[in-house]
Image: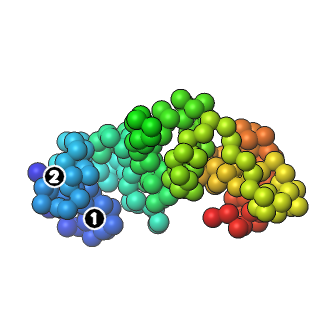
């Protein structure tokens, strides 16, 4: 069982300690209401971390302000190679990768649907998880038409290559850690436009 008898260490690293403690509880305490989302579906904590808070602190350090622990592979264990400190938005994005979508008798992950449709994962994720489009509309291979009024507002500001869907894609990909340069190159727009969208100096009406 976890070794939590290190009062001096836990006082100095109080927040990291409670992250570690809660991580173990949700994986091994069957009485917790959210146990089925963690230990109940096979999520574990590596032996080294489970046995000692000091090992967890050595590998992860103290959590930066505004960040919490996240598993890169949402079906994988809590261990050094699979964990990072991430924002809530990054964690939600990560969890949605494994989301199963059922439509017209087929059930696949967003990633597999995107491959089948021949569109990017981020575009489909944005449609389903961010914009919450009806599946019949979201699961289209082509990019969706530009919205009339919204498109005109963008065009008047010099953003003729953008539409609401691409704006959401830009924000989602930047939140997931991609660079502005990479996002701009893949969408065929300038880094300046990506920066303006990211800082909400353009397309502020798109949430």
Q: What label does residue 18 carry, if any?
A: 1
Mark 2 burial class by Cα count in 10 Å: few <14, some 14-19, many 20+: some
Q: Residue at the bottom extreme?
A: 11
Give the Cα distance between marks 2 and 1.
15 Å
Of circles 2 and 1, the one toward us is: 2
Quick check: 95 above or below 157?
A: above
Do the residues bearing badges 2 and 1 touch, measured as CB atoms within 8 Å? no
Residue found at x 68% / y 63%: 206
Q: Secondary structure at mark 1?
A: helix
**Residue 197: x and y, percent?**
73, 58
Q: Which residue is mark 2?
A: 28
Instruction: Residue 42: tell me if it is visible.
Output: yes
Q: Quadrant of residue 118?
A: top right
Mark closest to the chain's N terminus, 2 or 1: 1
Q: Quadrant of residue 183?
A: top right
**Residue 195 vs residue 19, the one in the foreground:** 195
């Amino acid at each position: 069982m976890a070794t939590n008898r290190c009062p001096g260490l836990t006082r100095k690293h109080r927040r990291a300690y409670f992250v570690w403690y809660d991580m173990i509880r949700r994986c091994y305490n069957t009485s917790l209401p959210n146990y089925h989302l963690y230990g109940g579906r096979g999520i574990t904590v590596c032996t080294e971390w489970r046995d000692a808070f000091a090992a967890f602190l050595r590998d992860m350090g103290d959590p930066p302000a505004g960040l919490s622990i996240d598993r890169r592979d949402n079906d994988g264990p809590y261990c050094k190679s699979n964990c990072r400190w991430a924002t809530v938005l990054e964690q939600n994005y990560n969890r949605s990768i494994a989301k199963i979508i059922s439509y017209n008798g087929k059930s696949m992950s967003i990633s597999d649907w995107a491959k089948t449709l021949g569109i990017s994962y981020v575009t489909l994720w944005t449609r389903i998880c961010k914009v919450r489009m009806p599946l019949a509309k979201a699961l289209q291979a082509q990019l969706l038409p530009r919205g009339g009024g919204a498109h005109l507002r963008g065009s008047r500001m010099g953003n003729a290559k953008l539409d609401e869907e691409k704006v959401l894609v830009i924000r989602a990909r930047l939140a997931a850690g991609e660079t502005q340069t990479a996002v701009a190159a893949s969408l065929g727009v300038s880094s300046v436009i990506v920066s303006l969208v990211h800082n909400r100096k353009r397309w502020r009406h798109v949430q």
